[in-house]
Image: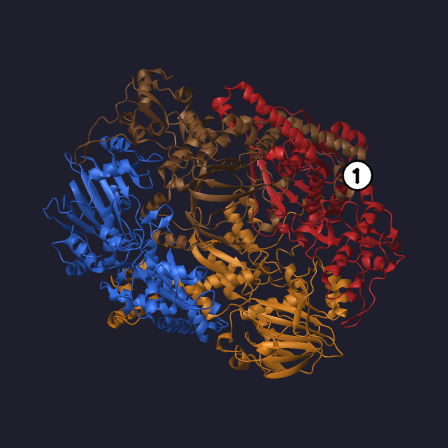
Chain colours: A blue, B orange, C red, D brown
Amino acid sequence: MPFPDGDSEKDGKVLFDWLILPYTADKFFENIWEKKPFCLSRHIPNYADGLFSSKELNRILKECNVRYSVNLDVTTYQNGCRETHNIEGRAFAPVVWDYYKNGCSIRIKNPQAFSKPVWRLCATLQEHFKSMVGANVYLTPPGSQGFAPHYDDIEAFVLQLEGEKQWNIYNPRNAAETLPRFSSKNFDESEIGEPIFSKTLQAGDLLYFPRGIIHQAKSLPDTHSLHITISTYQMNTWGDFLEKLLPATLQTAIADDIEFRKGLPLQYLSCLGLQNSDKNPEMRQHFFRKISDLFLRLARMADVDAVADERAINFLHDALPPYMTPDEKSRTIQGCDVTMASPGNPVQHICDIDEKTRIRVLRKNAIRIVTAQSDANDNSVVQVYHCVQNSRIYHSEEKKSFEMDEDCAPALEHLINSYPSYVTVNSLPLRTDEDKVRYVDISLRERHLGNGEKSKNVANLNCLIMCQL
Amino acid sequence: MPFPDGDSEKDGKVLFDWLILPYTADKFFENIWEKKPFCLSRHIPNYADGLFSSKELNRILKECNVRYSVNLDVTTYQNGCRETHNIEGRAFAPVVWDYYKNGCSIRIKNPQAFSKPVWRLCATLQEHFKSMVGANVYLTPPGSQGFAPHYDDIEAFVLQLEGEKQWNIYNPRNAAETLPRFSSKNFDESEIGEPIFSKTLQAGDLLYFPRGIIHQAKSLPDTHSLHITISTYQMNTWGDFLEKLLPATLQTAIADDIEFRKGLPLQYLSCLGLQNSDKNPEMRQHFFRKISDLFLRLARMADVDAVADERAINFLHDALPPYMTPDEKSRTIQGCDVTMASPGNPVQHICDIDEKTRIRVLRKNAIRIVTAQSDANDNSVVQVYHCVQNSRIYHSEEKKSFEMDEDCAPALEHLINSYPSYVTVNSLPLRTDEDKVRYVDISLRERHLGNGEKSKNVANLNCLIMCQL
Amino acid sequence: MPFPDGDSEKDGKVLFDWLILPYTADKFFENIWEKKPFCLSRHIPNYADGLFSSKELNRILKECNVRYSVNLDVTTYQNGCRETHNIEGRAFAPVVWDYYKNGCSIRIKNPQAFSKPVWRLCATLQEHFKSMVGANVYLTPPGSQGFAPHYDDIEAFVLQLEGEKQWNIYNPRNAAETLPRFSSKNFDESEIGEPIFSKTLQAGDLLYFPRGIIHQAKSLPDTHSLHITISTYQMNTWGDFLEKLLPATLQTAIADDIEFRKGLPLQYLSCLGLQNSDKNPEMRQHFFRKISDLFLRLARMADVDAVADERAINFLHDALPPYMTPDEKSRTIQGCDVTMASPGNPVQHICDIDEKTRIRVLRKNAIRIVTAQSDANDNSVVQVYHCVQNSRIYHSEEKKSFEMDEDCAPALEHLINSYPSYVTVNSLPLRTDEDKVRYVDISLRERHLGNGEKSKNVANLNCLIMCQL
Amino acid sequence: MPFPDGDSEKDGKVLFDWLILPYTADKFFENIWEKKPFCLSRHIPNYADGLFSSKELNRILKECNVRYSVNLDVTTYQNGCRETHNIEGRAFAPVVWDYYKNGCSIRIKNPQAFSKPVWRLCATLQEHFKSMVGANVYLTPPGSQGFAPHYDDIEAFVLQLEGEKQWNIYNPRNAAETLPRFSSKNFDESEIGEPIFSKTLQAGDLLYFPRGIIHQAKSLPDTHSLHITISTYQMNTWGDFLEKLLPATLQTAIADDIEFRKGLPLQYLSCLGLQNSDKNPEMRQHFFRKISDLFLRLARMADVDAVADERAINFLHDALPPYMTPDEKSRTIQGCDVTMASPGNPVQHICDIDEKTRIRVLRKNAIRIVTAQSDANDNSVVQVYHCVQNSRIYHSEEKKSFEMDEDCAPALEHLINSYPSYVTVNSLPLRTDEDKVRYVDISLRERHLGNGEKSKNVANLNCLIMCQL
């Protein structure tokens, strides 16, 4: 697995290229993505070494608070019957392995919460997809199958980590289940027809399939299987975009265009509806033309940018927090050391930021400057959303955002646009040198205690940037 | 006030013509409706006699359970200050008149619940407008004003009943308040500019103004004023129609058209939104064109008939029940007499309906056959909505509807389409003569006790029809 | 049925005596009430004439908005199977009678809402029982039964009005179902054992049974049956009283007595509970003694008067409004005539109350002066609850009450205590003669417009009193 | 701080003795507890070394996800004005220390979640108090005060860790605020009178005060202060016990004793309540006596054991999970190692428990066997509650419990009663030796896959026991 360079979008691209190597991204998105399943036999068993292993799973069970149902499922699929054997509470290693020895499959949900390499992989790929990237890990004992045939609501990248697994892949059952919005139930064999292909994955191999593709897999009689499924693009369609865009656009239209506020024709109920569909065709046509005209007006009024920002905010809520290397972390406020001269006496000047310090934002897509508005004191402010303080547990934190004075926003925009380059503090588009240092120096607070609003802006900004040493 | 002929749509038209006489309906809807205020000085003081009077108000207060705030408001507007003097509980005549003698205005809300002529007027006009028609009555003592300047969210027809009142009329303050969706607050004189005209209404005169037109009125020093305001077309606009149509259409599109289920482009968040509105113009254009294309697809998929039926159902919920004359009522199941031969012994054969009986539905627009579907036992059924059992109190009853076997629906459609003509029972498009009589004869139940579903259809139908004697 | 004298408590007693004649009330409450069923064969078929009849039922169905399920049930009980045949909407006379002719029983729920004699009977008896008195009417065609065996949660007085009905009466099945709090399900014959007696009621006869007594009844083959069941004492037990008293008392004790705020003993969990019930008996005994001691302290602190007032308020909410004769009504504000000198010109002086006018409250138990507190402006006030503006439909109105200045309360207390005697206005314990007339004269408002609070007191009081002419 | 012996109740007692040394527990509970404040100057500055320090705080801020408001407060109290300076999100060390350098006090809420010694102290003391034991840490820069005078709703033990702090202690303001149920607002100096004593705490010193005692403290001009406050006995009073006991007892009484189901006397509303308190004294007395009698009946029916169990369950929900030493942990299922022979191949036999293995429960008061009932399949079961899988974050986990077959319960009771002794598996009161090993051996599952219920019992039990090596 390639090591990150530190430029998040480039890292995301590099990791995606690695994921589908020797295929190429251009061809993938042109021929495969959302179109058909796709399989790569790489014949490099250690291709994904270091990402995850059954040994790592053993460590996690001992050291982490892994809970049945929440983080781990114990399942079987035998004779067409899918069962879940979860008990309550924490999953202790001896119990989980006992299930496994007795033929149960183990699914780790959200392994990125326990495994740093998986976190790194998902957090980096999400800079590429601009959509949440999740993962599940599946451990299957020899000669068994843990799940019934079904389809999912996400784009799936299956990476074989240990052993082998034989996959059967089936086309969607009909047009309505092609690129579906929601996952299927567990299917009976009789409902899914013949597979379009069968394939045995070996360690290092990749299998991709779009949402709606039905699939099932079993381990071979003599070897176990461990794979990770990377998922993305859940609810990330044109339809999802329009579900936000349409109601907002209509409200704008009603407020701004009197055509939408005029009364309906006196007789419209008499020429429309089930009992009138064969009556008064001329009046019906007239009504339909008016409706078409109003749709056209709506299209011209649609505020696409506002909806994009709304979706970006939701993406930042869904997203993993950035994975930072120890070196990266040491150059952020989180990793910055405070020395204690004596008990109760921390060393005075803490982070040595001056006008020549070179800084950048942590990640390209971890921050979004959104709405321009006024705060409670009627100052012009923008709202800044970010995922930097998200938890590795999905949605366990609220959306993170803070207000920033509108005249400080260009400095943050400058930082975002300059990424991945570092820029000096004195190149920030702010008025005075003092402003510039203050903008990123938490010691500002010293001079502003009691002036809460100003201090808050700065404290919040601090967690978004990293220095170059 | 003209006496109804018994053909509800014609009656509605006749009453509307009477309302705006000597102006004509064609000219009214072409030049006035939703466009501008309009005033008729008829010089016929007894033009609306019999509709409502202060004497009738006195009767209502004594005989009916009129409640403060619910049915009656006591108000003053003095020195720019609007006050409500309602107490709690029932409004007794001596107390109300005492308020009045002390300079308070009295507003009767929903007088159609207490006054038969007002009920008749509103219920008949609603057959013309196909939108709920409501009313308020305002009694103002000499030399006073009860309400602050404001605008409403309905089309208003003010009919002067007693005394005189001087009106000041003002244009909407801006484009956004022209044909507004919601009523205004009480305005201060300084907010509304100069009136576009002033006019003193005398008994028999009419004043119309569209929603959004600001108005205020006061009685003259030496005479009281009594007027009724007839209102209609609340929330009955193209925008209201689209609020139902758009979400339904999008759900249909997502289910039926794969274009709406395809993923958004990988980079779309990077070229849209506040911080990106100046970036990557080509990709932005491409995105906007795609959105326009999807709006066009939506327009072609819009199920206008379904939304019209949904609005028709809501209209039937809002609507007043039909006002029936004693003669009409005697020809319905409600007015049909049952004679008691002795205590506990009603005369056996009740309503003499046979195949030659001539029947019609009670009112043209009181019934709507809506969705075709299946009932709990998987029979094909339609849903029939109606306002015949509505209360005269707005929304105090739930929506009224019943299921009807789909093969019985043509008989009801035939009745609706034949209106106002009566048709013989044996002309109904049902299979056998027995079926036809059963269809409208409640005595059917006699043979079907325990066969609930079938009986229900019939019992429900019975309340929708009237016989010709 | 005796005609009311106008003294409500006496009237209530007279009507109750009439109900159980020739038995006496003293003996009834000593030997029968809540103890055992009781039957009176009076042999006076017209004993209850004028209360209700099948002819009156026919009138009600034609003239009133009687709704299935809400006001009327159509039922059968055949071969051990209890069915309800209600359809939706209004119950039209021909349909109801058709059900009846086909063997269905008809139950009128809440007939006091449609029948003045039933209203008068219930409203008057409630002055005797100080607990809500309700009623149901049951009409049964010949040779049938409408209801399964069951018991109720109320004391029931069954008065036969027309025809005959044969009753089977059974003891409660066990101690827990003796005087039960809730009604039973429908029993199967196999669950109820043998009747303790059977009895055929004839017109004029009475049957009483306490809650918990199982009963069923059928009409004879050749005659129909009509009876009314008068019910009272629902949820009116010592347990219901304690359910209010206990939590209030404990809160008082915790606030006022430090013993209740002291910590529990350090080891108490180790000597109590399932797993410790056999451990440390000495410490357990000590704990139990302390608990007993705290119960004794609670008993001494119980504020019985406050709970009685709370229950009185709830009774006034449940209660029927007083039934007033036309003569009585003419002496109240509701029946007081206002003459119109000309349109919009009511005659100035309305109700001629002066200091010599003799007045009393409408009914003894229709008013309750309750809590002493302060109003929003920090004046000392009492709260006055009443049932005078209740609807005849159970709980269709909110609780009715108003504030009264504390120094006016003695006047109202004087009125309540003087009942049934009329007292002159100038005998009211208020300071000045002007105060006394003002207290009851609505014309007070004339001088106080804008002084809302004061006026409200008076307006509210007005509806509670009646003049002597 | 003494090192635990491994017998939890004894350890709790030892740690409490250490806390109040050189005072003794017997005298403390007799003279001080819940009675008055109490101060110990030990003159041993390193008395509590290893419990918590400002250096440890610095480590926690760097390594743990400490959140403003959730885990940490930044406060000042200057010139009678108490302010909170919390910002949003994670508290980074440089920012927190900057606040501190600028005169702000820092409060760590729930330090037991971040510090193992604090967790150990609280978890062990809770075995002594049988009530949740919590903690807060307060760091105050020199010459400042962070909090306004107030009182709390818990028993407080203040242990000075670094520097010095001067305390002012005040009596409760009145009887109602002695041992109060809820904490006070921040007081103004003018509201609290003169202190009953002032005292400067030095490192190693202890201050205790009961709930209701008002207190405030400030650091000296030249030295900072760090102290920890240990709290317990929140809502753990006789009143709290009765709040559960009374309603349950009344429901039992109503169900079992007909006296509680009898009707109230016909006239009771006429002799009780505000307006009747001077009427009919004899009837009032009779009513009061009846109420007293019913209280006595209630006292005799009270099910004290059931309420004790309910409170024990709530205590186990509130409680910290046991702190286990590495040695202890290695003898539990959590610390038991699973070796991987090769990837995907864990070594077969996992925990070597046989009939001679000696086991005990983890902690004396961490488990409670509660209600006897039947499970879904109608087997007799008991419910076992425990705090072993609780989180160190208060209430972040649901109550933990599982069902156990009733015939297995004696084995668990035996284990609880034998604590702190270890017992051999074959001494468990179960039928067969196989049963005994199965009871505690997770390998049982191997033979019972698909027999979910049985396996669950055992898996749950496993986490409650520890082996002796």
- Relative to D286, B390 lies left or right: left
Q: Residues within 10 Å of mark 1 (few under 14, many from 20)?
A: some
Q: Position of residue C211 (x, y in %)?
A: 66, 32
Q: Position of residue A29 (x, y in %)?
A: 19, 60
The residue lying furthest to the left in this view is: A43
Label 1 element class = loop
Q: Chain of mark 1?
A: C
- Relative to A5, C338 lies left or right: right
The residue lying furthest to the right in this view is: C356
Which residue is label 1 attached to? C47
Between B381 and C311, which is closer to the camera in this rendering? C311
What quarter of the picture does the C terminus of chain A occupy? bottom left
Q: Which quadrant holds residue D182?
A: top right
Q: Which quadrant holds residue D127?
A: top left
Between C141 and D72, which is closer to the camera in this rendering? D72
Q: Position of residue D400 (x, y in %)?
A: 41, 34
Between D101 and D402, which is closer to the camera in this rendering? D101
Q: Position of residue B241 (x, y in %)?
A: 45, 67
A396 w.r.t. D266: above or below = below
Q: How many marks?
A: 1
Amino acid at pointer 1: Tyr
Whether residue B202 can be seen here: yes
- Relative to D249, D133 lies left or right: left
C435 w.r.t. D286: above or below = below
Between C309 and C240, which is closer to the camera in this rendering? C309
Whether residue B272 can be seen here: no
- Relative to C198, A115 lies left or right: left
